Amino acid sequence: MADIAADRRALQALHQQDLADVERLFPGPAYRDVLGWIHDYRRPRNYLEIGVNLGLSFALVRPETRAIGVDPVPNLSQPVAGRIFKETSDVFFARPDLRNIVDAPVELSFIDGLHSFEQTLRDFINVERLAAPTSLIVLHDVHPFRPEVATRDRHRIFWTGDVWKTAAILKQERPDLSLTYVPASPSGMLLVTNLDPVQSSLDDRFAEIVAAWMPRTLPENTAEVVAGFARTANTEAAVCAYLSRFSDRPASA
Ligand SMILES: C[S@@+](CC[C@H](N)C(=O)[O-])C[C@H]1O[C@@H](n2cnc3c(N)ncnc32)[C@H](O)[C@@H]1O
């Protein structure tokens, strides 16, 4: 019993340290602020969120947007407007009636489910298939600030997993995508557009890509993880200016 209490105290102490580092390394607005600006700027017809948890990011959806959330164990802190599917993203994307459920093309998606790179890569592949070229996919947790928060298994309260690899894979494998990194607290986000719903190279080479990236470790200087990406500041003006470079509505809508 005493050991459990001591473990909890140690975990909390590490968490306080992580929070202090986040405050120092990621100043300014957080990822949910950025997501809110994107909703307000784009006013998407529909929205697909992978990983809902308490529903805090899901709650940013505008009243006119049809929203769908997917989470095997959602832990909603309040009622949300939209449909929540209590299942893993893989089960959701395998539904035979998927296209009817999501009313494709999906215009905006936030991927924030299971924090392993192979799962987020699969989520990306599945969302892109439902998207239009002008749709926007937002990937969370792409910039861990220390190796201890980027482990494949969770050991700390604050945890990004190895989703940073997914961002690196998209950059390496898909030069046709438009990518920008936003340094929003607590662990950065990647905005992805210029999508191609019929591109299958990531899917075709999935096993090969996963095998190549599995053994890679986080660079000692974690700034290197995002150094090669175009960057958009985490201010509303900068994010909206970036979005204004792209048409925001599929031609079919
Ligand atoms: C970090 S939380 C999401 C936080 C939320 N997006 C927000 O910003 O308020 C991650 C969520 O992903 C869910 N999750 C875990 N594995 C998943 C999977 N395979 N498919 C979809 N969601 C998953 C977890 O249950 C957890 O609620």
Image (spheres, rainbow, N blue to C red):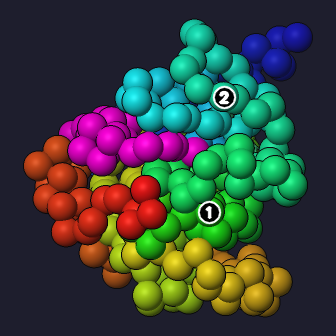
Q: Quadrant of residue 202?
A: bottom right
Q: Nearer the viewer, residue 155 or 51?
A: 51
* Mark drawn on residue 130: 1
Instruction: Please check the rendered image and state whether residue 36 is part of the magenta-colored stretch, yes or no.
Output: yes
Crowding at dot 1, Cα within 10 Å, few <14 / some 14-19 / many 20+, comes out as many
* Amino acid type, mark 1: Leu
Q: Is residue 12 left or right of residue 245?
A: right
The residue at which mark 2 appears reads as 83
Q: Tell me the residue at 31%/59% (across/down).
A: 248
Q: Tell me the residue at 51%/43% (across/down).
A: 47
Q: Which residues are magenta?
A: 27-48
Q: Is residue 42 left or right of residue 151?
A: left
Q: Tell me the residue at 44%/72% (across/down).
A: 133
Q: Earlier in the sequence, mark 1 or mark 2?
A: 2
Residue 104, above or below 158: below
Dot 1: element: loop
Q: Please indicate, yes or no, whether residue 23 appears anywhere in the rendered image.
A: no
Q: Quadrant of residue 72?
A: top right
Which x, y percent locates residue 196? 52, 79
